Image (cartoon, helix red, strand yellow):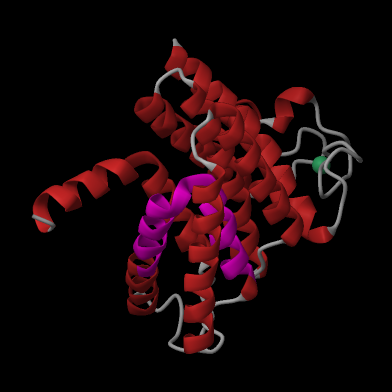
Amino acid sequence: MQYFLIVLFGLLIGSFLNVCIYRLPRGESLLFPPSHCMSCSRRLKPLDLIPVVSFILLGGKCRYCGTPFSSRYIVVELLTACLYIGCLLIFGLSAGLIRSLIFVSFLIVITFIDYDHQLILDKVLIWFAGAGVLINWITGSLPLGNMVLAALLGGGLLLLVAVVSRGGMGGGDVKFAAALGLWLGWQLTLLALLLSFFLGGLGGAILMLLKIKGRKDFIPFGPFIALGAFISLLYGYRILAWYLANFLR
Ligand SMILES: [Zn+2]
């Protein structure tokens, strides 16, 4: 039952995240106007707002003009639901679950805006950072000193990489890493960034092998930081414990 509820909740929130991903970079309000068909501008009914449901009922088309909705909307919703299930599996019904769901939701918005626009928005990062400090404070997850240290460490590390790589990494990535520190503390932040370098290198190689991207094409790094952060949030302490047990005797 709880899995059914988390999937439903994930689809609903995913629908809202789609709105954030589309409107925030365009400077549009999240609330007004209400969701409408991009083609005929007619307002969508509540059930149409959940593309997965509307896809099953209407074949993924506008009920008025028949224009198909972008498959992106369904991808984001299903992804949200899947990641929410992952969080439930790891954290169970706990305060940690709520913390992880909020964290993951921000990661999805940051990832897709960066993918679309090669941009990590300051306004999103400010909300992300603020939510992290607030939630860690309320749940007593992290001491403030650890958060500040982690923000300096994460931001500093990527700033160094940005300077050395001369443009391979943007200011948005640096600020994103600093905000991550406020959420994760210094151990998991370092792990998240190491994972993101590894995944970014691997992802870049695969994209070039498949000829989706050329050697000189820009590949946004934000999605890889987000992926590293997600893995670190779910499995970070287990990975660290395994590492300490096997390599640091
Ligand atoms: Zn329409």
Q: Is residue 206 above or below residue 144?
A: below
Location of the N terminus by quadrant is: top left
Where does the magenta region start and end?
Answer: 172-197
Residue 139 lies in quadrant: top right
Residue 58 lies in quadrant: top right
Q: Is residue 172 left or right of residue 38?
A: left
Does residue 245 appear anywhere in the picture?
A: yes
The x, y position of residue 190, in whole percent, is 39, 59
The x, y position of residue 237, in whole percent, is 30, 42
**Is 227 a magenta residue?**
no
In the image, what residue occupies the spot 83% across and 49% down? 39
In the image, what residue occupies the spot 53% across and 89% down? 166
**Is 180 a magenta residue?**
yes
Foreground residue among 161 and 133: 133
Does residue 55 appear anywhere in the picture?
A: no
Q: Magenta-highlighted stretch: main secondary structure?
A: helix
